[in-house]
C-alpha cells in the first residue's frame, strides 16, 4: 500500500518508501497532523487551534488568517511533491480532502481488517504477515509533533483501541502458527511498553505453556494472580485464572519449579554471557536506526537471524553508543547472551586480530584455551560451541575488512554487528543487508540532548542553546563535550558559552582538560586523519581552505596540482574514512562543519597555503568567466586581474550546462566571494558581479544583493572607479527587484555620480534608465515616463540594440501604468522586439513577446496575442529565465481565460504562481494571483478567488502599485455588495462557472 502521510510518529511525508519529516515548517506540519485525524471532514477553526497550540503558547488572535497562511504553505508542499490532497480554510473551518487510505493510521486499520479476514479463513500465516506489516507503519509515538490535550487524548484512544489489540493479534497468530518462542519474545518487548496489560498477561500464560515452559507459566500466573487479588481487581484475577485453568488443563496439579540448566556434551553449563558496556538512558533521534537493526537481525516472527550487519559513520557520531543501546534491547532475543569487543581499529594501540577475538570468546565461554595450541583448531572449537548457542556478537572499532573477514565463518551461527568509522567496502559488498550509516543528529534531538544534560539553565536560554546546536551540527561527541563544559561552569550562560566556542581552536580542543584527556574533537578526528597516506592528508587539508562545505574534484585538483583522476582517488579514500561525504552521483563532495574546522586548522600548516588558496579561488573565477561568455555573449567583461597559470578549466558544451553549473555552485561562489575580500579583491568583485547575472535569471535576489555588496566593497578597495560604478548600478537594480526602492535609488545615484565624473557615457545612460525604472517600481509611473522621454534619445544615439530594446520596453511599461497610451506602448514594444531580434538574446525576446501578448489581450486582439505567446513559448527552453517564464504563463492564463478555455487558464495560472513563489517576485506573484482569482471566480470558487485577490492587493500595495491595489479592492467591494456568485453551467461542456454581475465581467481586462 502506498502511504502519502504518516502521523504514527513525527508527521511525515511517506513517498515511495522514503520518510521525510522536514517536508514543511513545524506549524504547517502540526496543522496537517490535526486534519489527518479527520480527513474529508471540516473541523471548526477553534478545534484546529485547540489541536495545534499548546496551553503555554499564545493562540492566534485571527485564527482564520493564521490557518489560511499555514494552508497556503501546505498546498505549496502538496504541489511540489505531487500529493493528491487539497486543503482549504473558510469561516466554517478547515477541510483536508484526501483519500483516507493514503494516511498511515487508516492504512493500519485496513491492513488489520485484512489480517482478521485471513484469520477467519484459517490462513494464519497470511494473517500474521499482514498484521506485522501494519505494526511496521508505526515509526514512533503517534503524533510526536503535537503535545496538546486533544493530541494526548487521541494517542490514548489509539493505544487502547488499536495498538494494543493489534499487538495482541500478532501474539495470538504467532501461537496459531506454532511460533510460541516468537510469541514469548514479542510479549517480553510489550511488557516494557505496556506493563500490567491484562490482555498481554493472559497471552503470556498461553505462550509460555506452548513454548514448553510450564513452570515459568505457573510462576507468572501465581505472581500476577496474587497482585490482582491484593489490588482488589477480582474480575481481572478471575479472567487470568480462567486462562490458566484452560491452558494448563489440570491447574490443581503442582507444577515443578525451573530445573537447573543442563550440561552440554563437554560437561559444561550452557550459561548466559553478558559482556556489554553499561546501558545509556536514551539515544534520542536514533529510533529509525534501532528499528533498522531490528529488521536486519530478526526474521518475520521476531526470532534472531544468523546475519552480519555493518554500522558505519564518521568520528564522534555515536556509532558505539547506538550499538550498545541496541544490544541491551536485543540481548533478550539471544538466550545465551551478548558480547561487545573492541578491536582497537581507531586507536594507536595494536589492532586486535582474528586470533585474539577467537581466544577472547573462548575464554568468555569458559573454555580452557591453553588446551588447544593450533589457532585453526581453536577457531573450529569456537564455531562448534557457538553452533549450539543463540548469541549476539558486536565487533567494535574495526579498521578494515581484513581484520574481521576471517571471523565471519567462525561466527556464522551468530548475529554479528560490525562497527567501524571506515566504510569497509569489500566486506559490505558480501553482506545481504545494506550497510547502516549513522548520521549527525537533527537539530531538535541535539537541542533535547543539551537541555536534558544541562538542565534548567538550558531551558531558560533557548536562544543560547540554539546557537550551541548550530555549532555542534549534530555531532553527539561535540554535544556531550559542550554539555560537560556547561555543567562544569555553572555560572556561564548558554549564549556566553556559544560565543566562546566560536573560537575554532577552543572548540576543537574542548575536553582535553582535567581528568578526561584524549577525548576532544581534535583527538577524535586525528585518529582518522593520522591513518591516511600523505597525499590524502594534503587533500583533506586543502578541503579546509575551501570556504564552503561542498566542493568538486576539479577545484581541489586546481589547488593540489595533481591530475583530477589522482585527486578523485584521494577523495574516495576520505569518503571511505567518513572524513567527507559523497552525497550524490555528481562529482561533488561534502564535509561536516566540525571536520571542516579541523581541516582548516590543518591547512594553516601547508607550506604553500597562500598559493593553493589563490589557485582554488581563481579556478572559480575562470569557470564563471567561461559561463558568462556563453550566457551573455553581447556583454563586455570587467577588467580581469592577472592570474596564476594552472590546468585548464573543464569547459561547457552549451549555455544550459554553463547556467546549471553556476546555479549548482551558488553557495560556493558566494563563500569564495566573501573569503577573497581583503585577500584577493580582484576576485571578490569580479566573481559576484558576473555570478549575480545568473542569480537574477532564477530570481535569487538575496544572493545577488549579498554578492554585489561584497563586490562594491572590493571594487572600492581596489580603487577601480569604472568597476565600482558598474557594481553599484547592478546592486541598485537588484535592490529594486527585491523591493528595496530607497536602497536602489541610493546605489544608482552614486553610480551616476561616478559615471559622469569619469566620462563613462554608456554607464551614465544605463544608470539613468535604471533610475526611471526605480520610479516606476516605486509607484511613481508619471515621473518614470518623464525620465524615459528625456533619456530615450541618448539611448538611441549610442546605437546599442540591447540598450535600446530595454529602454523602449520599460518606457512602454510605464506608459501602460499611467494609462491612455496603449497605441504608443504597442509601438514601443514592437520596436523593442525588433532590436532584440537583432541581438539574438532568447530571454529578452521572450520578455518582449510576453509584454506584447499581455497588451494585445487587454485590447481584445486575441489572435495576435496568441501568436506572440506561441513565439514566447518557443523560447522557454533556450532561456530558462524564471521571472520571464512566470510572466509569460500569467499572460497565457489571461489569454486562455479570455478564449473560454478554463482548464488551460487554471494550468497556466497555477504554474505562474509556483514560479513567483520560487523567484520571490512580489509584483509577478500579484499578477499571477489576480489571473488565477479571475478564473476561479468565474468558475465556481468565489471564496478562494476573494482570498487570492486580497493577497494580490496586499502585494501590489506593498510594492506601491496603488492603482492596481485600489482596482482590486474596488472589485472585491462590489462583489461583496452583490452577494455570493451563482454558479451556472457553461453551454457546451460540463464545467460549472460562476457569473459575476455584468459590469464586473471586465475583470480580465484589469489584470495587467
Image (tube, rainbow, N blue to C red):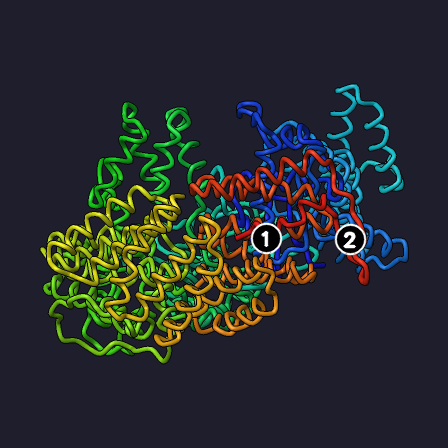
List the residue tagged with mark 2: 992
List the residue tagged with mark 1: 1005
The answer to whether any part of residue 174 appears in the image is no
In depth, the one of 196 and 754 nearer the eye is 754
In depth, the one of 875 and 14 nearer the eye is 875
Report the side of 195 relative to 274 (left or right): right
Q: Earlier in the sequence, mark 1 or mark 2?
A: 2
Secondary structure at badge 1 equals helix
Query: Which quadrant of the rendered structure holds the N terminus?
Result: bottom right
Q: Position of residue 390 (x, y in %)?
A: 60, 57
- Above-or-below relation of 712 to 846: above
Q: Is the Cβ of the residue at disc 1 closer than 8 Å to that at disc 2?
A: no
In depth, the one of 234 and 312 nearer the eye is 312
Secondary structure at badge 2 equals strand
Label 2 CA crowd tier, 10 Å (few <14, some 14–19, many 20+): some
Tell me which corner region of the image, top left, top right, bottom left or bottom right, holds residue 62: top right
Amino acid at each position: 500500500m502506498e502511504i502519502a502521510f504518516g502521523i504514527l510518529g513525527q508527521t511525515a511525508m511517506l513517498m515511495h518508501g522514503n520518510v521525510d519529516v522536514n517536508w514543511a515548517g513545524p506549524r504547517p506540519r502540526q496543522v496537517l497532523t490535526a486534519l489527518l485525524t479527520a480527513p474529508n471532514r471540516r473541523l471548526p477553526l477553534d478545534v484546529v487551534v485547540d489541536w495545534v497550540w499548546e496551553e503555554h503558547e499564545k493562540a492566534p488572535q485571527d485564527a482564520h488568517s493564521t490557518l489560511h497562511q499555514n494552508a497556503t504553505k501546505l498546498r505549496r508542499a502538496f504541489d511540489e511533491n505531487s500529493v493528491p490532497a487539497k486543503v482549504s480554510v473558510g469561516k466554517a473551518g478547515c477541510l483536508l480532502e484526501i483519500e483516507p487510505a493514503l494516511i498511515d493510521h487508516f492504512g493500519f486499520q485496513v491492513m488489520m481488517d485484512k489480517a482478521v479476514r485471513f484469520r477467519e479463513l484459517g490462513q494464519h500465516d497470511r494473517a500474521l504477515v499482514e498484521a506485522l506489516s501494519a505494526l511496521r507503519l508505526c515509526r514512533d509515538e503517534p503524533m510526536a509533533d503535537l503535545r496538546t490535550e486533544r493530541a494526548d487524548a487521541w494517542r490514548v484512544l489509539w493505544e487502547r483501541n488499536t495498538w494494543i489489540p493489534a499487538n495482541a493479534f500478532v501474539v495470538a497468530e504467532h501461537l496459531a502458527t506454532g511460533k510460541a518462542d516468537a510469541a514469548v519474545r514479542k510479549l517480553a518487548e510489550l511488557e516494557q511498553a505496556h506493563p500490567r496489560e491484562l490482555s498481554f498477561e493472559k497471552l503470556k500464560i498461553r505462550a509460555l505453556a506452548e513454548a514448553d515452559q510450564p513452570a515459568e507459566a505457573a510462576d507468572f500466573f501465581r505472581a500476577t494472580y496474587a497482585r490482582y487479588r491484593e489490588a482488589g481487581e477480582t474480575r481481572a484475577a478471575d479472567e487470568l485464572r480462567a486462562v490458566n485453568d484452560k491452558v494448563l488443563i489440570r491447574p490443581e496439579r503442582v507444577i515443578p519449579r525451573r530445573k537447573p540448566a543442563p550440561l552440554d556434551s563437554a560437561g559444561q553449563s550452557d550459561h548466559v554471557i553478558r559482556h556489554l558496556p553499561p546501558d545509556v538512558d536514551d539515544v534520542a533521534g536514533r529510533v529509525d536506526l534501532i528499528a533498522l537493526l531490528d529488521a536486519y537481525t530478526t526474521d518475520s516472527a521476531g526470532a534472531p537471524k544468523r546475519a552480519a550487519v555493518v554500522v558505519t559513520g564518521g568520528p564522534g557520531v555515536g556509532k558505539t553508543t547506538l550499538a550498545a543501546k541496541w544490544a541491551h534491547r536485543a540481548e533478550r532475543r539471544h538466550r545465551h547472551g551478548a558480547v561487545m569487543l573492541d578491536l582497537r581499529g581507531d586507536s594507536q594501540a595494536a589492532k586486535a586480530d582474528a586470533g585474539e577475538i577467537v581466544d577472547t570468546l573462548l575464554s568468555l565461554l569458559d573454555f580452557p584455551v591453553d588446551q588447544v595450541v593450533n589457532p585453526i583448531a581453536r577457531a573450529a572449537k569456537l564455531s562448534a560451541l557457538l553452533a549450539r548457542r543463540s548469541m549476539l556478537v558486536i565487533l567494535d572499532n574495526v579498521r578494515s575488512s581484513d581484520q574481521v573477514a576471517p571471523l565471519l565463518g567462525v561466527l556464522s551461527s551468530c548475529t554479528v554487528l560490525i562497527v567501524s568509522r571506515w566504510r569497509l567496502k569489500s566486506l559490505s559488498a558480501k553482506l545481504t543487508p545494506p550497510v547502516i550509516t549513522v548520521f549527525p543528529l537533527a537539530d531538535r534531538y541535539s537541542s533535547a540532548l543539551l537541555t536534558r544534560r544541562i538542565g534548567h539553565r538550558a531551558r531558560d536560554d533557548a536562544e543560547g542553546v540554539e546557537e550551541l546546536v548550530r555549532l555542534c551540527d549534530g555531532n553527539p561527541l561535540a554535544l556531550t563535550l559542550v554539555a560537560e563544559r556547561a555543567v562544569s561552569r555553572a555560572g556561564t550562560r548558554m549564549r556566553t558559552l556559544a560565543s566562546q566556542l566560536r573560537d575554532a581552536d577552543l572548540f576543537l580542543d574542548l575536553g582535553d582538560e582535567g581528568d578526561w584527556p584524549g577525548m576532544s574533537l581534535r583527538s577524535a578526528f586525528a585518529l582518522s586523519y593520522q591513518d591516511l597516506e600523505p597525499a590524502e592528508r594534503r587533500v583533506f587539508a586543502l578541503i579546509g581552505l575551501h570556504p564552503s562545505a561542498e566542493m568538486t574534484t576539479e577545484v581541489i585538483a586546481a589547488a593540489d596540482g595533481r591530475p583530477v583522476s589522482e585527486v578523485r582517488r584521494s577523495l574516495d579514500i576520505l569518503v571511505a574514512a567518513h572524513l567527507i561525504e559523497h552525497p550524490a552521483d555528481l562529482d561533488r563532495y561534502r564535509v561536516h562543519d566540525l571536520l571542516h574546522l579541523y581541516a582548516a586548522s590543518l591547512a594553516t600548516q601547508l607550506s604553500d597555503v597562500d598559493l593553493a588558496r589563490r589557485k582554488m579561488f581563481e579556478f572559480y573565477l575562470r569557470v564563471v568567466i567561461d559561463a558568462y561568455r556563453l550566457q551573455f555573449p553581447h556583454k563586455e567583461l570587467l577588467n580581469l586581474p592577472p592570474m596564476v597559470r594552472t590546468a585548464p578549466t573543464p569547459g561547457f558544451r552549451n549555455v544550459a550546462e554553463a547556467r546549471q553549473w553556476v546555479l549548482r555552485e551558488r553557495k560556493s561562489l558566494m563563500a569564495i566571494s566573501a573569503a577573497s575580500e581583503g585577500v584577493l579583491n580582484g576576485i571578490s568583485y569580479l566573481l559576484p558581479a558576473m555570478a549575480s547575472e545568473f542569480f537574477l535569471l532564477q530570481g535569487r535576489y538575496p544572493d545577488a544583493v549579498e554578492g554585489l555588496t561584497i563586490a562594491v566593497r572590493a571594487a572600492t578597495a581596489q580603487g577601480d572607479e569604472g568597476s565600482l560604478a558598474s557594481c553599484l548600478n547592478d546592486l541598485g537594480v537588484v535592490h529594486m527587484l527585491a523591493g528595496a526602492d530607497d536602497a536602489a535609488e541610493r546605489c544608482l545615484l552614486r553610480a551616476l555620480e561616478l559615471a559622469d565624473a569619469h566620462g563613462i557615457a554608456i554607464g551614465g545612460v544605463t544608470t539613468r534608465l535604471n533610475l526611471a525604472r526605480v520610479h516606476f517600481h516605486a509607484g511613481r509611473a508619471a515621473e518614470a515616463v518623464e525620465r524615459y522621454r528625456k533619456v530615450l534619445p541618448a539611448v538611441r544615439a549610442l546605437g546599442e540594440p540591447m540598450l535600446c530594446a530595454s529602454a523602449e520596453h520599460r518606457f512602454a511599461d510605464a506608459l501602460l501604468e499611467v494609462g491612455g497610451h496603449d497605441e504608443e506602448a504597442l509601438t514601443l514594444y514592437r520596436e523593442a522586439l525588433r532590436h532584440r531580434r537583432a541581438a539574438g538574446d532568447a530571454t529578452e525576446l521572450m520578455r518582449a513577446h510576453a509584454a506584447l501578448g499581455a497588451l494585445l489581450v487587454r485590447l481584445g486582439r486575441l489572435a495576435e496575442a496568441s501568436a506572440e505567446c506561441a513565439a514566447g513559448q518557443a523560447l522557454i527552453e533556450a532561456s530558462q529565465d524564471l521571472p520571464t517564464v512566470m510572466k509569460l504563463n500569467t499572460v497565457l492564463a489571461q489569454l486562455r481565460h479570455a478564449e473560454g478555455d478554463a482548464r488551460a487558464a487554471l494550468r497556466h495560472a497555477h504554474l505562474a504562481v509556483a514560479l513567483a513563489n520560487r523567484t520571490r517576485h512580489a509584483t509577478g506573484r500579484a499578477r499571477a494571483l489576480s489571473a488565477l482569482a479571475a478564473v476561479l471566480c468565474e468558475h465556481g470558487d468565489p471564496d478562494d478567488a476573494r482570498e487570492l485577490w486580497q493577497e494580490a492587493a496586499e502585494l501590489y500595495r506593498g510594492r506601491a502599485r496603488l492603482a492596481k491595489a485600489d482596482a482590486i479592492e474596488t472589485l472585491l467591494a462590489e462583489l461583496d455588495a452583490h452577494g455570493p456568485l451563482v454558479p451556472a453551467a457553461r453551454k457546451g461542456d460540463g464545467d460549472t462557472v460562476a457569473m459575476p454581475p455584468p459590469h464586473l465581467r471586465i475583470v480580465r481586462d484589469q489584470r495587467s
